[in-house]
Image (cartoon, rainbow, N blue to C red):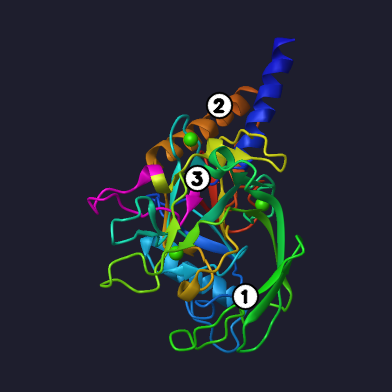
């Protein structure tokens, strides 16, 4: 009887390890390793950051995003208007450490300069999602969970959870959209500063995005600030927590990272019924623009991403190693052979030359 229970525990352990990523590198990085998906909505920075060049495929654009964001490169990537998204991963799974924010997503939000609007500036908040590589194929094709941010607590009734929008091509013109609430509109152009096409050139017509739409945060204060500032003055107020490109990356001393404002706790993840889910690790992070809003000369509200980082790299690595070694020990006790993984984290029996992971270390078959 005891022995049966013991074997069951071993199997459960093996399942959780398959969803954990640990690349065979000497030193792990806390920064983004690569971008997996880039599907921006139209907008004034689209086809520009990163730049689209004739003939570029979706894979080319994803590679350009990786070049801008990986290894703390801090090149900006724009997601366009509501719904546009990016997905990225690290060289290891990010652990959910109880009671702590686990990773941060950096953007280009900033505090406005007059000092008349505390908590206001330019917040173009993006909704954050997380996923485990549950099927172990190294691809972001598993269940996704949204991070429930502060609007779910302080703006009850103002958040639209089943929002859907579709954009249509209109070469060099204003981009029309319709949504599932019976509304329609168009994205304006500002040819003087952004003269390029605003619809992502490499993507098909009729792009549709679904998700949570955050309540409007941008307001027109034209004429109510000193004349030394722009006469057309818009303020986009910060939300409390749980979003990307929402609050400034640094605190007021301009040196200290704004972990409270930009950090994400994996424990905030919810399922489609907005019920909390328990995730011990995540392998992929996605961010999408959470507002359908335009603010005068600022045009459409668009989330931008500057990078992301694991806020407790050592803890993530230690927790993965603990889980991995736990399984190995149990498997050894039951008389099984060595457990070997490929670089996508799948359990395998090495039959070809290549690099594998064995006992948590690089293992070369040649
Ligand atoms: Ca946590
Ligand atoms: Ca997968
Ligand atoms: Ca921004």
59 to the left or right of 364: right
* Residue extent of the magenta highlight: 242-260
Residue 248 lies within the magenta run: yes
Tag 2's secondary structure?
Answer: helix
Q: Does the CB distance between marks 1 and 2 fall below 8 Å?
A: no
Q: Which mark is residue 58?
A: 1
Q: How crowded is mark 3: few (under 14 residues within 10 Å), some or many (20 or more)?
A: many
Q: Are marks 3 and 2 in contact (CB under 8 Å)?
A: no
Q: How far apart are marks 1 and 2 (CA)?
A: 43 Å
Give the main secondary structure, helix, strand or loop, of the magenta stretch. loop
Magenta segment includes 49: no
Ligand 1 within 8 Å, label 3 CB: no
Quadrant location of the N terminus? top right
Residue farthest toward the front in the current orientation of the protein: 223
53 left or right of 252?
right
Residue at 55% x, 44% y is 151
Q: Where is residue 137 in the image (x, y as percent from the top left)?
A: 66, 53
In the rendering, at what x and y percent does residue 317 appear? Answer: 44, 40
**Residue 310 in view (yes/no):** no
């Amino acid at each position: 009887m005891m022995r049966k229970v013991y074997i069951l525990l071993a199997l459960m352990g093996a399942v959780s390890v398959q969803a954990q990523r640990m690349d065979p590198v000497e030193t792990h990085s806390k920064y983004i390793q690569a971008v997996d998906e880039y599907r921006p909505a139209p907008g004034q920075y689209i086809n520009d950051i990163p730049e689209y060049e004739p003939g570029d495929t979706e894979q080319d654009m994803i590679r350009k995003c990786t070049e801008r964001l990986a290894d703390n490169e801090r090149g900006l990537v724009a997601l366009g208007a509501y719904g546009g998204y990016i997905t990225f991963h690290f060289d290891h799974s990010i652990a959910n450490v109880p009671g702590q924010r686990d990773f941060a997503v950096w953007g280009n939000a900033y505090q406005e300069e007059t000092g008349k609007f505390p908590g206001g500036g330019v917040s173009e908040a993006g909704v954050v999602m997380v996923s485990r590589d549950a099927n172990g194929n190294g691809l972001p094709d598993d269940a996704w969970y949204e991070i429930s941010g502060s609007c779910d607590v302080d703006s009850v009734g103002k958040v639209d959870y089943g929002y859907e929008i579709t954009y249509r091509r209109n070469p060099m013109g204003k981009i029309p959209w319709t949504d599932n609430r019976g509304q329609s509109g168009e994205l304006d152009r500002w040819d003087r500063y952004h003269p390029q096409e605003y619809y992502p050139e490499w993507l098909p017509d009729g792009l549709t995005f679904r998700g949570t739409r955050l309540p409007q945060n941008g307001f027109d204060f034209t004429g109510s600030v000193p004349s030394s500032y722009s006469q057309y003055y818009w303020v986009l107020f910060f939300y409390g927590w749980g979003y990307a490109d929402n609050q400034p990356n640094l605190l007021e001393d301009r040196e200290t990272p704004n972990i409270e404002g930009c950090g994400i706790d994996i424990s905030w993840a919810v399922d489609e019924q907005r019920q909390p889910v328990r995730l011990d690790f995540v392998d992929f992070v996605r961010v999408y623009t959470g507002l359908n809003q335009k603010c005068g000369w600022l045009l459409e509200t668009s989330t931008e991403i500057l990078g992301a980082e694991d806020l407790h790299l050592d803890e993530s690595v230690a927790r993965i190693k603990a889980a991995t070694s736990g399984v190995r020990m149990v498997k050894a006790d039951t008389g099984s052979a060595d457990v070997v993984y490929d670089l996508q984290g799948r359990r395998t029996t090495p039959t070809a030359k290549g690099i594998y992971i064995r006992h948590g270390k690089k293992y070369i078959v040649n």
